[in-house]
Amino acid sequence: MARRIGLFGGSFDPFHLGHRRVLEAALTLGGLDRIHVVPARISPHKADEPTATADERWLMAVLATLDEPRARVERWEIERAGPSYSIDTALRARREAGPEAEIVWIVGADQLPKLHAWHRIAELLAICRMGVVPRSDMAGERLAAAIAESLPAPLSERLFALPMEPIDLSATDLRLAAARGADLAERLPRLTALYVERYNLYSCPLRDPPRTPS
């Protein structure tokens, strides 16, 4: 039987318990044999640069997955120049896994409205299927409809809903909470939380928002 390989990309700024739940669901409910966690160097889908450095984000993901032997945290995108396009990562995974492996890209439901603008999306979906992670505001029939409407058929038929409970933990919210002095220990994997606390990664004062000229 052909192996099923997962690709789980993102900024992971920080890698939190929601990311860990997605990884576990992809391996168990999604039937994957192995999953590559791929921190992005520069995401073409985000306006802001990551807060932590690429090496810090890679290490946070490593610490969060040390006890899961089926997960490998890769430096593919960190060490590749330019924006982190998914198609380049999928081609790398295909070369490593071989032509017989089935590749599944794990993506959040929030990305569905943006998929039409992903670089070489048709070629990407020829290489891999996409497992979509539900959210509380986009699950069940709503998620199925959003998947069907995200891209023209037959591209949309390469997407499927990952059978898991919705994830609503946001890295952006965690960074803001940490900057206000909140303790993130209960929302991060244990070793990742210790690393964040030890090096004070996100507990910097919030900058005042830019003022609108009068």
Image: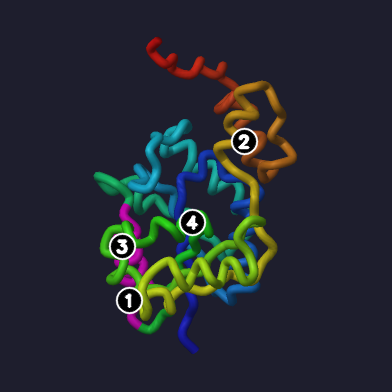
Q: Is mark 1 on a helix, strand or loop?
A: helix
- Residue type at mark 1 is Ala
Amino acid type at image mark 3: Ile
Mark 2 / mark 4, whichever is N-terminal: 4
- Amino acid bearing label 2: Leu
- Which residue, given by chain and number where applicable, does mark 1 sit on? 126
Mark 2 Cα-neighbour bin, 10 Å: few <14, some 14–19, many ≥20: many
Query: Is there CB contact under 8 Å for labels 3 and 2?
Result: no
Tag 1 and tag 4, C-beta contact below 8 Å: no
Quarter of image, res 96: bottom left
Give residue 37's mark: 4
- Cα gap from disc 4 to disc 3, whole angstroms: 15 Å
**Residue 174, numbered circle:** 2
From the viewer's perspective, is residue 142 above or below residue 46?
A: below
In the rendered structure, are the residues bearing label 2 and label 1 in contact, judged by CB atoms less than 8 Å apart? no
Give the residues in magenta. 85-99
- Which sits earlier in the primary sequence, circle 4 or circle 3? 4
> Does the magenta run of residues contain 90?
yes
